[in-house]
Image (cartoon, rainbow, N blue to C red):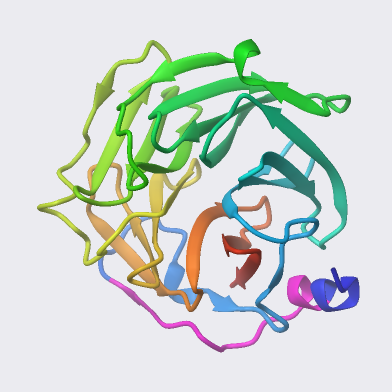
């Protein structure tokens, strides 16, 4: 990682490779005001391939990136300083990752279709699947399965997206009750696939990522579009927002985009 370049990304802002249009008024993160910052894209620290999900931990001020094969979680700061790599034993094809509350984190396995919930402390260096709490969502059994994971701490529910064939949005309680807040095949939001998702507590909105459509859509939790952002990345996989409102997107093999207002 070239740290001076990374720091310029966080500090600078350049209007390139982004176009957005607001489609509905109301409280909003306002994707129309976001621009890709100078120096982007860059690389996820200590990841050379298979960057598959991203989340921000406000308690530590760090980002967590999930690597699907071999499974691991890489922690780094918003200015690109690698902190540690947490190996994951017994996991297969992990995709989305979300910081829930306190030390609690969750990930999803794409084809096996489940959520694993566990704690990451400052001392954690390895996570064993057998030691996690598992919530079964949808045993998809394919490479077109669960792709993105996020969490609403107020209502204590997960939101998950299934990539395609068919596209699906899931709402999952901690007790394992599964529902669909909208039909993603009928209300596509003009996204041909669904590759990542982030919930913003400040607005109560979801931010849905599509690598095929090269877009992020801000929407209500029942699928009403609020704003849209064009994203130029080969295979966008994970999305999160940091405490200062910066938008981070990771993609395979190891790319990282940063957008700022």
On screen, 88 above or below 190? above
Q: Residue furthest left?
A: 186
* Residue 114 image-quadrant placement: top left
On screen, 1 above or below 84? below
Q: How far across and down, in percent of the image, does residue 56 sit? A: 66, 45
Asked whether the viewer can see residue 201, the reply is: yes
* Quadrant (top left/top right/bottom left/bottom right) for the N terminus: bottom right
* Residue 215 vs residue 137, the one in the foreground: 137
The residue that appears at 61% across and 19% down in the rendered structure is 129
Horizontal side of residue 212 vs 31, given as left or right: left
Q: How far across and down, in percent of the image, does residue 207 sit? A: 41, 54
Q: How far across and down, in percent of the image, does residue 120 sit? A: 74, 25
Horizontal side of residue 114 vs 2, given as left or right: left
Magenta residues span 8-22
Asked whether the viewer can see residue 102, the reply is: no
The residue that appears at 26% across and 69% down in the rendered structure is 23
Q: Say whether residue 16 is magenta.
A: yes
The residue that appears at 51% across and 86% down in the rendered structure is 17
- What is the count of numbered marks? 0
* Residue 226 image-quadrant placement: bottom left
The residue that appears at 34% across and 66% down in the rendered structure is 227
Q: How far across and down, in percent of the image, does residue 81 sit? A: 87, 57
Q: Say whether residue 156 is magenta.
A: no
* Quadrant (top left/top right/bottom left/bottom right) for the C terminus: bottom right
């Amino acid at each position: 990682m070239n740290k001076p370049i990374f720091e310029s990304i966080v500090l600078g802002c350049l209007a390139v490779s982004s176009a957005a249009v607001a489609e509905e008024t109301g409280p909003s993160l306002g994707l129309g005001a976001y621009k890709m910052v100078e120096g982007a894209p860059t690389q996820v620290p200590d990841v050379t391939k298979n960057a598959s999900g991203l989340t921000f931990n406000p308690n530590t001020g760090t980002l967590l990136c999930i690597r699907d094969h071999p499974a691991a979680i890489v922690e780094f700061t918003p200015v690109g300083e690698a902190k540690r790599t947490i190996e994951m034993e017994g996991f297969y094809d992990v995709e989305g990752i979300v910081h829930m509350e306190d030390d609690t984190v969750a990930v999803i396995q794409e084809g096996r279709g489940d959520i694993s919930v566990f704690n990451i402390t400052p001392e954690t260096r390895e996570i064993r699947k057998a030691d996690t709490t598992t919530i079964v969502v949808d045993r998809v059994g394919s490479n077109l399965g669960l792709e993105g994971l996020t969490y609403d701490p107020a209502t204590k529910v997960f939101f998950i997206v299934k990539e395609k064939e068919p596209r699906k949005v899931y709402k999952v309680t901690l007790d394992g009750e599964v529902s669909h807040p909208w039909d993603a095949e009928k209300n596509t939001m003009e996204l041909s696939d669904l590759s990542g998702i982030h919930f913003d507590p400040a607005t109560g909105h979801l931010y849905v990522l599509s690598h095929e459509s090269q877009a992020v859509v801000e929407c209500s939790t029942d699928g009403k579009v609020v704003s849209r952002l064009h994203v130029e990345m080969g295979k966008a996989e994970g999305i999160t927002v940091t405490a200062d409102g910066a938008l981070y997107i990771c993609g395979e093999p190891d790319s990282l985009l940063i957008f700022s207002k």
